[in-house]
Image: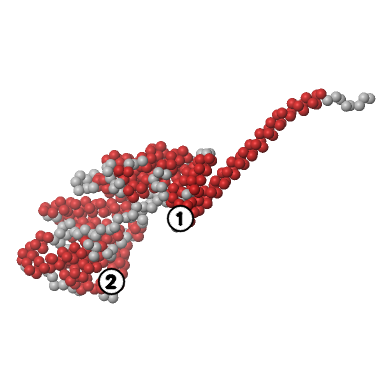
Amino acid sequence: MSLNFAIVSRRLTGNWFLRCVFAFAALFLAGQTSPAAGTNATVPPSTSSTPALTNLVANTNPPPAPAAEPVAALTLNDTNELNAAAMADSGRIGELRSTLEDARHLRLMRQPATAEPILVGLLSGSPEIIQQSALLELALVAQDENNPIRAEQIYAQFVGRWPNDKRAPEIFLHQGQLFRQMGLNSLAFAKFYSVMTAALSIKNDQLVYYQKLVLDAQKEIAETHYQSGHFTEAADFFSRLLKENNPDLNRAEIQFRLIRSLQASGNQTETAAQAADFLNRFTDSPNQPEVRFCLALALKELGRNSESLQQVLALLKEEKVRAKDHPEVWAYWQQRTGNEIANQLYREGDYPKALDIYLSLEQLDRAAAWQLPLRYQIGMTYEKLLQPQMAMQSYSNIVSRQADLGTNSTPGLKAMVDMASWRINFLQWQSKADNVNKALAMPSEGAVENRSPEKTASKKAEPSTTAMP
């Protein structure tokens, strides 16, 4: 089958069958590589292991994910080879190179459907150097379209036809990422280790480039362990990376990943140590709020409640200047951290500390969707602290804001208003009942004390009525 036909054939009616065969073959190979491969796709658990409370503060929504950028081209480009080919045949190569650049520009401008037919056309009758570049661009188009199976097919076809190409190690890296995306983690590991194997036969003029590739492969191995649910192994690999002296290493990002892995593995002592070091070392990192959340949670699990409370309050009081670059991220972690730690303290009966956090959370957002559940939780905490008047004030605040909900409010918020109203009525009834009980108890006790001496004296003063004989 020709190169051109292999690419164009996806448009034929039998393309779906080809994809199915590839997927099943990949799954079979994954099973042969490791019997436990099926467990590698386990989704790592959320850092929130707290069971829901009946009167839980409103759930926070994670910050929106940024729009995906087009996949970056290979680091080791083909500029020098194209220049050499253009010198040999300036007219034809120059024209084909211009067409290739147009297709690449269209892909980067998020127009993959327009770029694809241009790249497919370059695969027919073009010099080998043009075919190579067009094929790699076509793989990137498939990645941009979130079609990992087709992208993997194209990369495999490239390596099969040009196994000694200097870009092969970087292609292995892309293949590993694609296999991981498809949940085939055993095959992903094999490709990442292939990057390091290929680097053994490097040339001195590309030493820096291959060193960076090996570093990237090590990071991908650690990340794959994390996504597979193997948190202890992930922490071990991230720890090894931090010992590297490579200037290209993003130490803040690696230590952040290490902290997440340590917490997911249950190593709270090391989590607290690494998180505290991160906060002191990388004061401007956008991951500061999540790291402080991990630190507060780890301290709470270690029974160091006062220190955990200090971390929560420090996060809630962070200056707005620090949060201006990523306000939605800071808001999410402030709300989630305060919410989870306060709820844990509430469940454990540490109501004063829980109340401190709830009152601080009140300042984060004035929207009714956040304020009403929070005020209800504050009211419940005041009840636990035997302060019914303060509790009724919190519930009354909820009822007074019923008009703010509008017609599009959720059933949960409407139910919150009804529950607050019921709690007010209950507390009022309870207060009246207590007063009545006290009023009934006080006269009864006084009457006994006042009447007893009088009855005794009257009995002594009464003359005897016994008949004389």
Q: Amino acid at mark 2?
A: Leu
For the point 19% across and 69% down, the residue is: 118
Horizontal relation, residue 278 to residue 169: left or right: right
Q: Quadrant of the C terminus?
A: top right
Q: Residue furthest right?
A: 469
Scheme of colours in the image: secondary structure
- Of the image marks 2 and 1, the number of the one nearer the N terminus: 2
265 relative position to 153: left or right: right
Q: Is residue 429 above or below residue 13?
A: above
Find the residue positioned furthest to the bottom: 13
Q: Residue at x 55, y 49 (%)?
A: 422
Q: Is residue 199 above or below residue 151?
A: above
Q: Quadrant of residue 463?
A: top right
Q: Nearer the viewer, residue 219 or 203?
A: 219
Going by the numbered disc 1, the residue's amino acid type is Gly
Residue linked to disc 2: 18
Q: Quadrant of the N terminus?
A: bottom left
Residue situated furthest front in the rendering: 403
Residue 346 seen from this side: yes
Label 1 neighbourhood size at 10 Å, few (<14), some (14-19), many (20+)? few
Residue 406, numbered circle: 1
For the question of whether residue 337 can be seen, the reply is no
Marks 2/1: CA distance?
A: 54 Å
- Residue 364 is situated, as x and y percent measured from the top left of the image, at 39, 45
Q: Position of residue 30 (x, y in %)?
A: 30, 62
Q: Residue furthest left?
A: 88
